[in-house]
Amino acid sequence: MATPELIAGAEPRLRPGSLSGRRRIGEDVVKGVLALCALVSVATTVGIVIALFVPAIEFFREISIVDFLTGTNWSPLFEPASFGVLPLVGGTLLVTAIASLVAMPLGLGAAVYMSEYASPRARGIIKPAFELLAGIPTIVFGYFALTFVTPLLRDIGVPVDIFNTLSAGLVIGVMLLPTVASLSEDAMGAVPRDLRDGAYALGSTKVQVATRIVVPAAVSGIVASFVLAISRAVGETMIVLVAMGQQPNLTFDPKEAAEAMTAFIAATGAGDIPTGSLEYKTIFAVGALLFVMTLVMNVFAIRLVRKYREAYE
Amino acid sequence: MSSIEPMTLGQIAQEHDEVETPKREVVFAVEDLAVAYASNVAIREVSLEVYKNAVTAFIGPSGCGKSTFIRCFNRMNDLVPSAKVTGNVLYHGKDLYADEVDPVEVRRRIGMVFQKPNPFPKSIYDNIAFGPRVLGLKDNLSDRVESALQRAALWDEVKDRLKESALGLSGGQQQRLCIARCLAVEPDVILMDEPASALDPISTTRIEDLMHELKREYTIVIVTHNMQQAARVADMTAFFSVDVAPDGGKRTGILVEYDRTSKIFTTPADKRTEDYVTGRFG
Ligand SMILES: Nc1ncnc2c1ncn2[C@@H]1O[C@H](COP(=O)(O)OP(=O)(O)OP(=O)(O)O)[C@@H](O)[C@H]1O
Ligand SMILES: [Mg+2]
């Protein structure tokens, strides 16, 4: 075979010589614009953190942080004011736990069904139904909980209050189901076919392939979907405001009314309280705590995933 | 590169050819098999017999349906929704595609090793133990794991790191791990679809040596692109080719010739086989 240089009449190649070239201006501009995009989101996050923590820190100048975090009585707006945040934290955790108990197993089950069992036809029906569910405004879910789920629970003999944590939690769980299902399904869909084939070739049944190969290999994506679901349940506002109530209540009984942290923030913020007052700063203190709780949970989840995942790359 | 001399392959094949071929027990009898993906017929009119304790090789140009065909023996094609298998595959006289046959039971007896090593993202031990656990064979699991690794000639290399991830092994070790994984459930037949095509020559030789060992206990069916490999390991060889419809449209895989390996590489009956094994085609 002739090498290119030996082809008669061919143009000479670039000669080795000076290797310096002109700067490519366009390249710099693109890089600058892209960096700006990244900067905007970082700056926004930093801005939010500052806006949240400055009033919160001022709040803790007046109220002991220990009293805030350990107190069991929350009545910041009435005399004598009391700033024990535990009833709100308890309300948020209880409603989140109920929502998680609905969204995680059902979402994971739906994801396994869609990725391992469903025919293309069944998938063609379920996927749009989930997208529809994900598109419903939360206020609609809130009233659905209050006017449908709560009466339904009473009809089937669960003695719930008008406002109660159970309906709110159940409905948040249903709302989050599509999120868990679709993110988990994406993670399972990314598990290489090879691995499934290998397991089937050893005489595994479908259930065994799903539970012993696909789910373990997709566990980081599945846990990520769980974490997102929990974060959204913790941050969910409308449903808890409408259906769970606004009575700070340190209880583990989901049949009773209670108040979630977000519901307090929304309700109090919507009322007329003077900027800079203690009540005003209370909102930020609760908001900052919410932020820290979500952050801690995310970090914890990332650690957990790193430890247990079966990476296939 | 010089083309491969037919005599060389023939000599290789004759080296291990058993002089008198006793009437062997038939493990698979394939009768007029065809596989179609939706409306595309990938392979048709295949009839052949696979014998016990022998290595049977399928060779032929890319796309002639070798993988499709070998996947019929353990019903892996069931996992491809568009695939449709017609004809019969008799396994010890029983039709593998009869209604009452459970593909899971079939795969428990007929193991498979794939072209690309596909260890599970688990420890070496858990990889080998996977099959026995799935089958509920929980007694003496660690003995079973050790024996499978021994037979796959991998034990000495991994015995101190059984708890480590299988993904940390080299490609050749991973493929022997996959063979060991298959042996751990004591199958009757081992199917291998180009098991050495992603490996270096030394790993390839090890796997070929292994096949010579394993055929004493198992029946082995192998797809290979490498004719030297077929000549070295196989007792019987089937040559497949692509039949192009007269209008130049549909391409279908067909079985051209099936015989003792030494015969295929020295005195093939079909001109197309001769062209292929002498490197004049494909
Ligand atoms: N899952 C599938 N869906 C549709 N068509 C397929 C599928 N698998 C294989 N085919 C088609 O069937 C024909 C035979 O493919 P097959 O993989 O069996 O060939 P092969 O002989 O193994 O080729 P190679 O030597 O390249 O591995 C090809 O035309 C291929 O495109
Ligand atoms: Mg193939």
Image (cartoon, coloured by chain):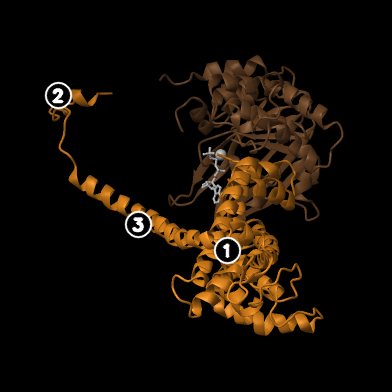
Chain colours: A orange, B brown
First in sequence: mark 3 vs mark 1: 3
Q: Is residue A287 visible?
A: yes
- Residue drawn 25% across and 23% down? A2
First in sequence: mark 3 vs mark 2: 2
Chain designation of label 3: A
Residue A300 in the image, given as x and y percentages of width and height: 61, 48
Give, as a three-letter code, the residue at label 2: Gly
Q: At numbered mark 2, what does the secondary structure look like: helix, strand or loop? A: loop
Mark 2 and mark 1: span between their CA atoms? 58 Å
Chain designation of label 1: A
Give, as a three-letter code, the residue at label 3: Val
Is A15 left, or right, of A133 in this rendering? Answer: left
Residue A26 in the image, given as x and y percentages of width and height: 20, 48
Q: Residues within 10 Å of mark 1 (few under 14, many from 20)?
A: many
Mark 3 and mark 2: span between their CA atoms? 43 Å
Give, as a three-letter code, the residue at label 1: Thr
Residue at mark 3 shares a chain with residue at mark 2: yes
- Residue drawn 64% across and 23% down? B207
Residue at mark 3 shares a chain with residue at mark 1: yes
